[in-house]
Image (spheres, grey):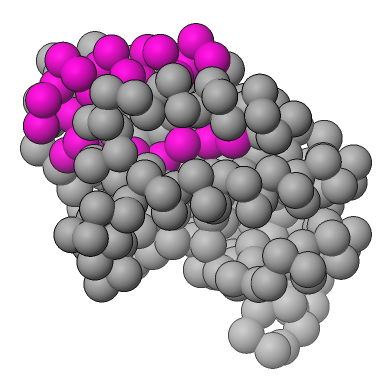
């Protein structure tokens, strides 16, 4: 919040971006041997995106440094498109033709309309942490994240969640179908020299969020398996139903699910459950 505006005010934002690209391009080949398809995200300022020579300089950088465009993801803010949109759209499209991935950073904090969003020529959107971090305790923010994931997928975007700081948020995002997570639950910032050792211990398959079962260790105490008990879960949100079912089955419960009230009543008549869970949000 301080350093980047200072670089922009000094006219050094573009030089800083290329310095980052040069530094990281020396490490990426080694990292990609450990994690196939790994790419590194570099923030690109509004000032840089509006530089008419930026795309040409990117092409020259790739040729001169023996780098590959698919190694990088260029992150730009949603508000970048609000200033000189025609030039920005043209730059983004040119950059993507070079093979770079382009994502919208801090998505949801800008002012673009839905119609404008449909026209964005980007690969991915990153949901801002202000919506993601509190989503397990704030239904309204969870609803925004859920809707953004669905909208992003419908528009053909990869969806990334920022600010994933605990297992509960991770699992809920997995149930909602989010593609990629970023945050302290996965790793904290580290020197480049430590990345290889971290990759050795990290399961690359976990970087994409599938539906994962909850860890049987919660807040420092072991959860003991319980005898099979019959639980009915009724909720009209399929992602929530799947997540709750997975958690309960992991703990040894026998779970049946219903998508609405009439279906739930029919199941109760067939076999009365010991517990009914309604509308988990």
In the rendered view, does 19 fall on the left or right side of 120?
right
Which residue corresponds to the image point at 66% horizontal and 50% vertical from the top-left?
A: 24
User: Which residues fall within the magenta stretch?
Assistant: 72-98
Evaluate whether residue 271 shows in this view. no
| Above/below status of 140 relative to 234 | below
**Magenta highlight: main SS:** helix
Evaluate whether residue 103 shows in this view. yes
In the rendered view, does 27 fall on the left or right side of 166?
right
Which residue corresponds to the image point at 77% horizontal and 63% vertical from the top-left?
A: 195
Which of the pair 97/200 is nearer the observer?
A: 97
| Quadrant in the rendering for residue 70 | top right
**Count of marks placed on residues:** 0
Q: Is residue 5 magenta?
A: no
Which residue corresponds to the image point at 41% horizontal and 22% vertical from the top-left?
A: 55
State the image coordinates of residue 257 (x, y, percent, origin top left). Answer: 54, 37
| Above/below status of 32 relative to 50 | below
Judged from this view, the residue extending furthest toward the bottom is 220
Which of the pair 232/197 is nearer the observer?
A: 197
Which residue corresponds to the image point at 51% horizontal and 68% vertical from the top-left?
A: 165
Which of the pair 93/154 is nearer the observer?
A: 93
| Above/below status of 142 relative to 265 | below
Q: Is residue 91 magenta?
A: yes
State the image coordinates of residue 2 (x, y, percent, origin top left). Answer: 25, 72
Location of the N terminus (image quadrant): bottom left
State the image coordinates of residue 168 (x, y, percent, origin top left). Answer: 53, 63
State the image coordinates of residue 231 (x, y, percent, origin top left). Answer: 59, 52
């Amino acid at each position: 919040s301080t350093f980047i505006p200072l670089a922009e005010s000094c006219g050094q934002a573009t030089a800083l971006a290329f310095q980052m690209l040069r530094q990281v391009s020396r490490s990426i080949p080694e990292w990609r041997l450990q994690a196939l398809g790994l790419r590194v995200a570099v923030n690109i300022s509004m000032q840089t995106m509006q530089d008419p020579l930026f795309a040409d300089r990117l092409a020259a950088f790739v040729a001169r440094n023996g780098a590959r465009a698919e190694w990088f993801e260029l992150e730009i803010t949603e508000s970048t498109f609000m200033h000189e949109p025609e030039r920005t759209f043209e730059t983004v499209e040119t950059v993507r033709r070079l093979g770079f991935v382009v994502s919208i950073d801090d998505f949801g904090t800008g002012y673009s309309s839905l119609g404008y969003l449909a026209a964005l020529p980007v690969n991915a959107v990153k949901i801002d942490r202000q919506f993601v971090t509190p989503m397990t305790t704030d239904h309204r923010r969870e609803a925004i994240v859920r809707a953004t994931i669905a909208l992003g997928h419908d528009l053909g975007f990869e969806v990334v969640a920022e600010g994933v700081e605990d297992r509960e948020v991770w699992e809920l995002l997995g149930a909602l179908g989010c593609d990629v997570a970023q945050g302290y639950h996965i790793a904290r910032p580290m020197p480049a020299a430590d990345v290889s050792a971290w990759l050795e211990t990290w399961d690359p398959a976990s970087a994409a969020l599938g539906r994962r079962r909850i860890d049987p260790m919660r807040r420092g105490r072991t959860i003991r398996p319980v005898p099979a008990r019959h639980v009915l879960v009724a909720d009209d949100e399929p992602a929530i139903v799947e997540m709750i079912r997975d958690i309960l089955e992991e703990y040894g419960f026998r779970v049946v699910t219903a998508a609405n009230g009439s279906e739930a009543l029919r199941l109760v008549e067939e076999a009365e459950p010991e517990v009914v869970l309604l509308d988990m949000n």
